[in-house]
Amino acid sequence: MSRRTLISLAVLVLTLGAGSFGYLHAQSNPAPEVRRDGLEATVDVSAMKPGELMEVKGLDLPVWVVRRSPVMLTALGAPVAPLDDPQSLRSAQPADLDPGLRSAKPEFFVLVPIFHVVNGRTGVWSTVSVQHVPADDTPRLLAGALHAWAGGFKDNAGRGIHFDYAGRVYRYANVWNGFASNISVPRHEFVGRTKLRIDVANLLSLPKGQGDARPGS
């Protein structure tokens, strides 16, 4: 996938996702320091409260930061339904991250709100954006059965694909429609206690097919 295609996707994601998480947006955070090439940004996350979601603007791909609460972290250790790739073996993410938390620091989850689907019938590979869905009391169809919803993300294509707060996909019941990957995670590290450096270059330069989903897990 070319860089130009991914930049176009970024615009699409921002359009589709607008309004889906506004009340959780950390409004008090200062603007990020973005490198001229649009690949790297440094953002201060000190003002974020547990449970808040912040959008990092100015990069070639959209980036969200979620400050996970203790309840969110506990839910990751006991997922409400089977996960398709719990150890993140097929994920687009830095290799040195913990496969369960998928973050440089447990409290902060950094993601590019997209994932990949391979159509089970045609083998066609596609990229889909996601929206944030907070925890609620409404059971959701996960892995072919109704389960309590602990919060996380849902696809914007109306396929009913859900992800936990580490961006790990719940087993996708309809195998004929596709096999979904985990949500993409960019390179990131903390510079000091509260400044987070994010680099999306690892997602813009993926070899064809890397990070897409594969059947059989």
Image (cartoon, rainbow, N blue to C red):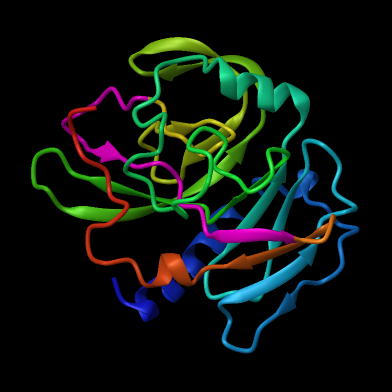
Residue 123 drawn at (x, y percent): 11, 48
**Region rendered in magenta:** 171-190
- Please give the name of the residue rendered at 35% of the width and 18% of the height, measured from the top-left corner: 143
> Residue 24: image x %, image y %?
77, 44
Question: Is residue 99 found left or right of 189 in the rendered image?
Answer: left
- Along the horizontal axis of the image, is 96 left or right of 149? left
Closest to the observer, 158 or 28 = 28
Q: Position of residue 114 (x, y in %)?
A: 45, 53
Secondary structure mainly formed by the magenta segment: loop
Drawn side of residue 20 relative to residue 9, left or right: right
Is residue 19 depicted above or below 8 in this figure?
Answer: above
- Residue at x-position 28% and y-position 50%: 212
Q: Residue furthest left?
A: 122
Which residue: 41% across, 29% down? 86
Residue in front for this viewpoint, 187 or 61: 187
- Residue occupying the point 81% across, 72% down: 31
Whether 40 is drawn above or below 150: the answer is below
